[in-house]
Image (cartoon, rainbow, N blue to C red):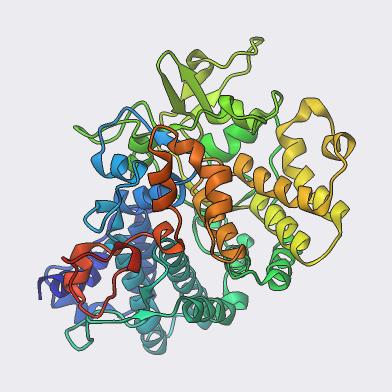
């Protein structure tokens, strides 16, 4: 089977090397033939090289494109840009079907296979390499399970019903026809799996290299991921427990100040508040995906630039951003006839003018990192969970104020408490809106909307009417509501090629057609 042969080659691709940030030593293996795989696992360096491949796989353009498309495209954050991307425009016009290229999940299962390979073969190497310390093995296994869980969490929130594969495709002995796992069971498996390596993962202080500290899975990265998973399953008590574990082990973690926030967190990357982010550089590995999705420059020759634009936030009533909020000014700007996403892509230079213009930005000559978790997310996850299980409004307000005050320095500390008399319902909406402001274009908003729908009994009407209809104002209102009225419709269909390759898969019921393979 052609697809299976492709999967088998994935393992060998991991051995071919590449670059991880500026750390070329991770990828110095050059096998001469596929037979090398049998002789590859000799010492710790081989294991480290394969661990590097887990991260390197996430740097692929298709992987990052999907992180953006899956987490942002159908949200109320973005609209079509000037780039002529038919798959993107089809999704934005609610014409999504199983042939759309963004329904393909191969890049994520490729990374999962790298991780499975480490998990299976690394212990065998440690047993025969006398210089390979057990504590190093534990760190590598924790990294592989962390990356694997992150990939599965992205897939689960995007498609809901997905196969769980925990063995590497290293030969033809494993069946390729794999049924989908119950999503609740899968999430429980991922949480338990992460807990099993939580304490053996490295602390940030383990590595002196900043690229390793921020670009590899650490204890705090695993705990942030577990907290996020608990929030998704509405287990708020455990979400708080894992947020508190991060907050009790901050080490060098701290929120960046208002003065350097945009520059440090996005423009330069690897900031003091970063927990885990993918490492890119113009020299070694450019972030083509982000340049093409958001940027006004760069990318690959012949590729569309600026495929996505920010939603017209200025037209919102009430406004999402206060006039003083630096996040709105830093994240996007408008020119005559068009609007652009600046977050990650450009650094805004403060001027005396109250109008934000293109000339106020210095565009990034480097390739921006992609951020999965940072300290701000821990504060806002804990705030949301706290408001779901208790009435400590002041405690939640204090947590939200950490990000709001940082973004609105001109208002002064405690401005939220001074200007509003919050009820519990109002506080819940405040946290929801603050997450949108804080994580604009960071691949989280659509999942937040979907999570809220799931919490409200799986009935999309409230969220669709409140947040999404305005985005589709140019489409027929009745048709839009009809296409967004079912929970199934808010997940992605499974790509038609995946259905052909794995006949055990069942298509998302909303997207079943007569042409689907049963």
Between residue 121 and residue 437, name the one nearer to us.
437
Q: Residue furthest top?
A: 353
Name the residue rendered at 66%, 52% in the picture: 375
Which quadrant of the figure contains the C terminus?
Answer: bottom left
Q: Quadrant of residue 407?
A: top right
Q: Nearer the viewer, residue 379 or 430?
A: 430
- Asked if residue 366 can be seen in this view, the reply is no
- When the figure is inspected, residue 357 is found, relative to residue 122, above or below; the finding is above
> Image point 19% across, 32% down: which residue?
302
State whether residue 336 is above or below residue 28: above
Residue 49, image x, y percentages: 34, 66
Q: Where is residue 381 in the image (x, y as percent from the top left)?
A: 68, 57
Residue nearest the observer in this picture, 450 or 382: 450
- Above or below, 123 against 57 in this view is below
Q: Which residue appears at 71% of the width and 57% of the height? A: 384
Asked if residue 233 lies left or right of residue 299, the reply is: right
| Quadrant location, the N terminus | bottom left
Quadrant of res 243 = bottom right
Q: Position of residue 257 (x, y in %)?
A: 72, 36
Q: Is residue 118 above or below residue 101?
A: below
Is residue 132 at all visible to an observer of this figure?
yes
280 vs 425, left or right, is left
Q: Report the residue that reaches farthest toward the front.
A: 478
- Taking the image as shown, residue 349 lies to the left or right of residue 44, namely right
Name the residue nearer the viewer: 222 or 33: 222
- Image spot of residue 16 (x, y percent): 22, 63
Q: Quadrant of residue 41?
A: bottom left
Q: How many discs mark residues in the rendered view?
A: 0
């Amino acid at each position: 089977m052609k697809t299976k042969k492709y999967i088998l080659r994935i393992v060998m691709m991991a051995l071919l090397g590449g670059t991880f940030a500026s750390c070329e030593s991770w990828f110095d293996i050059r096998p001469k033939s596929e037979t090398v795989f049998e002789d590859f696992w000799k010492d710790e360096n081989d294991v480290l090289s394969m661990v590097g491949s887990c991260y390197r796989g996430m740097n692929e353009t298709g992987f990052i494109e999907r992180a953006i498309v899956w987490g942002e495209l159908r949200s109320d954050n973005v609209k079509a840009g000037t780039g002529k991307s038919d798959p993107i425009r089809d999704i934005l016009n609610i014409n999504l079907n199983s042939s759309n290229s963004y329904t393909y999940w191969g890049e994520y299962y490729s990374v999962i296979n790298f991780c499975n390979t480490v998990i299976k073969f690394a212990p065998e190497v440690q047993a025969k390499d006398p210089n390979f310390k057990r504590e190093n093995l534990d760190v590598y296994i924790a990294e592989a399970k962390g990356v694997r869980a992150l990939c599965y969490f992205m897939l689960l929130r995007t498609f809901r019903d997905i196969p769980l594969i925990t063995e590497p495709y290293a030969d033809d002995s494993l069946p390729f026809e794999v049924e989908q796992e119950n999503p609740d069971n899968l999430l429980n498996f991922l949480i338990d799996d992460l807990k099993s390596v939580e304490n053996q993962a490295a602390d940030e202080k383990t590595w002196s290299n900043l690229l390793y500290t921020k670009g590899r899975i650490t204890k705090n990265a695993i705990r942030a991921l577990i907290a996020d998973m608990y929030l998704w399953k509405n287990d708020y008590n455990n979400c708080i427990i894992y947020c508190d574990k991060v907050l009790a082990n901050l080490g060098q973690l701290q929120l960046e100040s208002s003065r350097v926030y945009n520059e440090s967190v996005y423009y330069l990357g690897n900031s003091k508040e970063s927990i885990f982010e993918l490492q890119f550089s113009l020299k070694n590995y450019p972030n083509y995906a982000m340049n093409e999705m958001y940027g006004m420059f760069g990318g690959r020759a012949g590729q569309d630039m600026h495929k996505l634009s920010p939603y017209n936030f200025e037209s919102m009533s009430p406004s999402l951003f206060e006039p003083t909020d630096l996040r709105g000014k830093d994240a996007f700007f408008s020119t005559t006839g068009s609007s652009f996403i600046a977050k990650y892509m450009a650094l805004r230079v403060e001027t005396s003018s109250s109008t934000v213009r293109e000339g106020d930005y210095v565009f990034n000559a480097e390739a921006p990192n992609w951020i999965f978790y940072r300290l701000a997310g821990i504060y806002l996850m804990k705030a949301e969970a706290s408001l779901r299980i208790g009435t400590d409004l002041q405690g939640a307000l204090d947590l939200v104020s950490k990000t709001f005050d940082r973004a609105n320095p001109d208002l002064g500390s405690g401005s939220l408490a001074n200007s509003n008399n919050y009820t519990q319902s109002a506080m819940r909406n405040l946290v929801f809106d603050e997450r949108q402001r804080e994580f604009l274009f960071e691949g989280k908003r659509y999942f937040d909307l979907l999570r809220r729908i799931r919490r409200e009994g799986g009935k999309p009407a409230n969220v669709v009417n409140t947040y999404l209809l305005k985005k589709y104002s140019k489409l027929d209102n009745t048709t839009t509501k009809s296409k967004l009225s079912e929970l199934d419709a808010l997940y992605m269909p499974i790509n038609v090629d995946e259905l052909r390759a794995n006949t055990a898969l069942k298509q998302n019921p909303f997207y079943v057609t007569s042409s689907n393979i049963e």
